[in-house]
């Protein structure tokens, strides 16, 4: 294993441990680490709303900007001051979740292949975020703004892009005018607009994007920012004075760390770190990797254009086009560059039912590495080999807790690419084939590497999403348990509990009538 892979695996283990701990306290739906992207967009909306109000009420003249912002913090602290503080702390929160989001996606190896576009479009957002944050501090025009403006100008002067040093504009009072501040305000508005546009591009190839976190998480985050705004309100330093060198300023180390870092090291060192970090983010998905998994394949004769795979695909890899053989019908088309090879589309296809007659089960959309026909054959073979008093079939997920170790004389374990690949009809097929119960397991809620595998499976089995489990299947014969790879012991305990419940159940009237598939032999 390469050092990079070892470091990534170690980071993933840390994330999983922290996430599982937070699950116990907040639940997966309200676990902030499982919804970092949505949290980032949420803080961006808070920044946009508070920034719009501040833009409306402040005076952008060189003489009035400092006093108007001071008025908000002092005389109108109960509203304008709170909004200013919310704006400041939402900026810091946005920066934190952005870097946690980058680190988590890297740790979980989610930055190449079908995720390459999202990863690459996310890199410019980091630059836009910092340029917006630094420019926002300048608008206050206090000692901190003066310090940051001068340091940033010197930083860009090192690049020798302009013929005249930009730092000259902050050496004498006459160099800073009302026009400069009006321009600065427009720039501070422009960068966030590009940031919003870039965020749209960032998620453009992802379907069902969480633009907002869950209500409790959203309200909890907002209240946390509000408490900070009330307990530690944002205040300006002394007014900027270009005749004096700003000393002892209060630095926002999250947004302005590059400014003191330049003076502690050098402009060249800062640019080396900035460009080095950017190039590292660009290079990561280009590192040598194994061969990508085969993508989903559409079989035209068996595709009826129902659009279920189109609606369920997490990465908008499925589109609809006119059917080549059926007039006035559509056919699914798979974009290989966007396909995650997760098999969720197979679980959504109505022709993936194992009850279809025929020696070969050919479905409308299938995964070459685990065809639905092979899954049916494996299930039939495992069912035939089961013995014992209570026979259970376990359908597992390759990314969740390993189910192979559960296999035994009375337990058949089958591993899918993703739990979302499981057609609900396979549950009924297993019960009619001799199983006393079916246990379906997958990743923890919010932990599916393909985003919606666990959600769509749960909804299909709950009969709230098509294709759904038929009403003939008794609820007592089906059990769901979500488990990560670290939850192997908990999964084994859940299986034992399920077996006990089946054995202690009274009566036999909830068993399904055995089904014997008729094989159709074709004469050539």
Image (cartoon, rainbow, N blue to C red):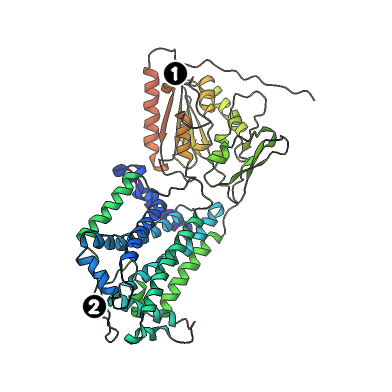
Asked if residue 101 lies left or right of residue 309, the reply is: left
Residue 190, picture quadrant: bottom left
Q: Is residue 143 visible?
A: yes
Q: Is residue 343 at all visible to an observer of this figure? A: no
SS assignment at label 2: loop
- The residue to which callout 2 is attached is 248
Q: x, y (%) of residue 362? A: 65, 32
Residue 248 screen position, x and y as percent? 24, 77
Q: Is 227 rendered above or below residue 130? A: above
Viewer-proximal residue, 473 or 130?
130
Question: Which image quadrant: the C terminus?
Answer: top right
Q: Which residue is mark 1?
A: 389
Camera-side residue of 26 and 154: 154
Mark 2 residue crowding within 10 angstroms, few (<14) / some (14–19) / many (20+): few
Count of numbered circles in the view: 2
Q: Position of residue 63 (x, y in %)?
A: 29, 78
Q: Give the Cα distance between marks 1 and 2.
A: 78 Å
User: Compared to 349, does 143 lie above or below?
Assistant: below
Q: Is residue 320 left or right of residue 438?
A: right
Of tags 1 and 2, which is closer to the observer?
A: 2
Give the image quarter of residue 345.
Answer: top right
Q: Position of residue 309 (x, y in %)?
A: 57, 38
Q: Residue at x 44, y 66 (%)?
A: 191
């Amino acid at each position: 294993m390469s050092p990079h892979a070892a470091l990534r695996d170690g980071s993933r283990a840390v994330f999983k441990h922290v996430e599982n701990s937070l699950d116990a306290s907040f639940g997966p739906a309200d676990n902030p680490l499982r919804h970092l992207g949505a949290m980032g967009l949420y803080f961006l909306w808070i920044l946009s709303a508070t920034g719009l109000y501040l833009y409306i009420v402040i005076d952008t003249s060189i003489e009035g900007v400092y006093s108007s912002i001071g008025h908000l913090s002092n005389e109108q602290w109960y509203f304008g001051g709170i909004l200013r503080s919310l704006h400041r702390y939402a900026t810091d929160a946005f920066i934190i979740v952005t870097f946690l989001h980058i680190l988590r996606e890297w740790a979980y190896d989610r930055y190449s292949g079908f995720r390459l576009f999202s990863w690459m479009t996310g890199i410019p957002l980091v630059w836009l975020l910092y340029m917006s944050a630094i420019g926002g501090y300048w608008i206050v025009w206090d000692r901190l703004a003066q310090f940051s403006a001068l340091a940033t100008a010197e930083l860009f002067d090192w690049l020798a892009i302009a013929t005249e040093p930009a730092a000259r504009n902050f050496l004498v009072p006459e160099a800073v005018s009302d026009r400069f501040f009006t321009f600065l305000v427009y720039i501070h508005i422009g960068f966030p607009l590009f940031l919003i546009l870039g965020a749209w591009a960032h998620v453009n190839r992802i379907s069902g994007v969480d633009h907002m976190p869950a209500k409790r998480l959203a309200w909890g985050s907002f209240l946390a920012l509000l408490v900070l705004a009330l307990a530690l309100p944002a205040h300006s330093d002394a007014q900027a004075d270009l005749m004096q060198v700003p000393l002892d300023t209060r630095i926002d180390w999250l947004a302005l760390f590059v400014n003191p870092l330049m003076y502690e090291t050098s402009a060249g060192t800062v640019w080396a770190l900035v460009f080095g970090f950017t190039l590292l983010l660009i290079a990561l998905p280009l590192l040598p990797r194994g061969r990508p998994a085969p993508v989903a394949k559409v079989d035209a004769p068996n595709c009826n254009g129902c659009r279920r795979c189109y609606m369920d695909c997490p990465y908008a890899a499925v589109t609809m086009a006119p059917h080549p053989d059926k007039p006035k019908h559509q056919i699914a088309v798979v974009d290989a560059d966007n396909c995650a090879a997760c098999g969720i589309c197979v679980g959504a296809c109505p022709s993936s039912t194992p009850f279809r007659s025929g020696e070969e089960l050919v479905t409308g959309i299938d995964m070459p590495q685990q065809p639905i026909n092979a899954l049916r054959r494996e299930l039939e073979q495992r069912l035939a080999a089961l013995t014992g008093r209570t026979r259970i079939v376990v359908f597992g997920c390759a990314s969740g807790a390993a189910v192979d170790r559960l296999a035994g004389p009375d337990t058949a374990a089958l591993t899918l690419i993703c739990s979302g690949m499981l057609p609900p009809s396979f549950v009924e097929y297993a019960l009619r084939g001799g199983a006393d119960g079916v246990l379906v397991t997958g990743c923890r809620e919010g932990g599916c590497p393909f985003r919606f595998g666990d959600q769509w499976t749960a909804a299909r089995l709950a009969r709230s999403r098509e294709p759904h489990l038929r009403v003939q299947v008794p609820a007592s014969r089906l059990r769901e348990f979500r488990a990560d790879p670290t939850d192997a012991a908990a999964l084994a305990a859940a299986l034992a509990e399920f077996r006990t419940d089946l054995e202690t159940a009274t009566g036999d009237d909830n068993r399904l009538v055995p089904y014997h598939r008729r094989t159709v032999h074709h004469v050539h």
